[in-house]
Image (cartoon, rainbow, N blue to C red):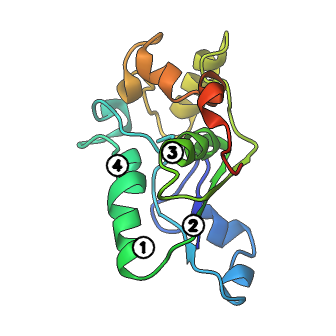
Amino acid sequence: TIVFLDGLRARNDYNGWETDTNVAYLALRGYNVVMPIGGQSSFYSDWVRPSRSAGQVNPYRWESVLKGSLPDFMNRHGFHNRTLVGLSMSASQAVIIGNERRDLYQRVVSMSGFMNLVATGMQTMLRGAAWDSGRYNLNDMWGWFPNAEAFRHSPIQQLPSMAGLHL
């Protein structure tokens, strides 16, 4: 089972992996392919509040989905032996979730991602990208930077705990 997470410009109708790649090739060869839909500029995280500037009423809860309801659904349907694949915006969160929940995801793939979310200037770049892609206010994700959640979600900061992670 392979779970493909979208990039920054995730849409609400299709996952980018379905529209921009030949991911169906895997499904035709016996792999269970799971592609969550939505999550533009979400960084697949649980946000502290909705981003009003983007018109949200409820905050994103992607981390809860990826650690809770989605694995529960996959378990009920016999989708085991999972790989979590993150592209761009979702790559760092795929690494964090895969590291924290090795019982849910046996492998992690990080493609073209941001591995040091707390590097000098990175918050400004992420803030600009999220604003450009839907007018999302990054302060609504984990609060004003610097904050503990940004450091917790930065793979470079978590390297000591990643020994043995199939990455």
Residues at marks 1 and 2 touching, judged by CB atoms closer than 8 Å:
yes
Residues at marks 3 and 1 touching, judged by CB atoms closer than 8 Å:
no
User: How far separated are the C-alphas under marks 1 and 2?
Assistant: 9 Å
Q: Which badge, 3 or 4, is on the more N-terminal residue?
A: 4
Which residue corresponds to the image point at 29% horizontal and 40% vertical from the top-left? 59
Residues at marks 2 and 4 touching, judged by CB atoms closer than 8 Å:
no
Label 2 Cα neighbours within 10 Å, binned few <14 / some 14-19 / many ≥20:
many
Q: Amino acid at mark 1?
A: Met
Residues at marks 3 and 4 touching, judged by CB atoms closer than 8 Å:
no
Mark 2 highlights which residue? 82
Q: Which badge, 3 or 1, is on the more N-terminal residue?
A: 1
User: How far separated are the C-alphas under marks 1 and 4?
Assistant: 14 Å
Which residue corresponds to the image point at 62% horizontal and 49% vertical from the top-left? 7
**Pick the front one: 115 or 59:** 115
State the image coordinates of residue 162 (x, y, percent, origin top left).
63, 36
Mark 1 highlights which residue? 74
Q: Secondary structure at mark 4?
A: helix
State the image coordinates of residue 16 (x, y, percent, origin top left).
62, 62
Q: Amino acid at mark 2?
A: Arg
Q: Secondary structure at mark 3?
A: helix
Q: Amino acid at mark 4?
A: Ser
Mark 4 highlights which residue? 64
User: How far separated are the C-alphas under marks 2 and 4?
Assistant: 17 Å
Label 1 Cα neighbours within 10 Å, binned few <14 / some 14-19 / many ≥20:
some
The part of the image, by quadrant, that contains residue 46 is top left
Mark 3 highlights which residue? 97
Q: For residue 159, which numbered disc appears in the image?
A: none
Q: Which badge, 1 or 4, is on the more N-terminal residue?
A: 4
State the image coordinates of residue 41 (x, y, percent, origin top left).
51, 41
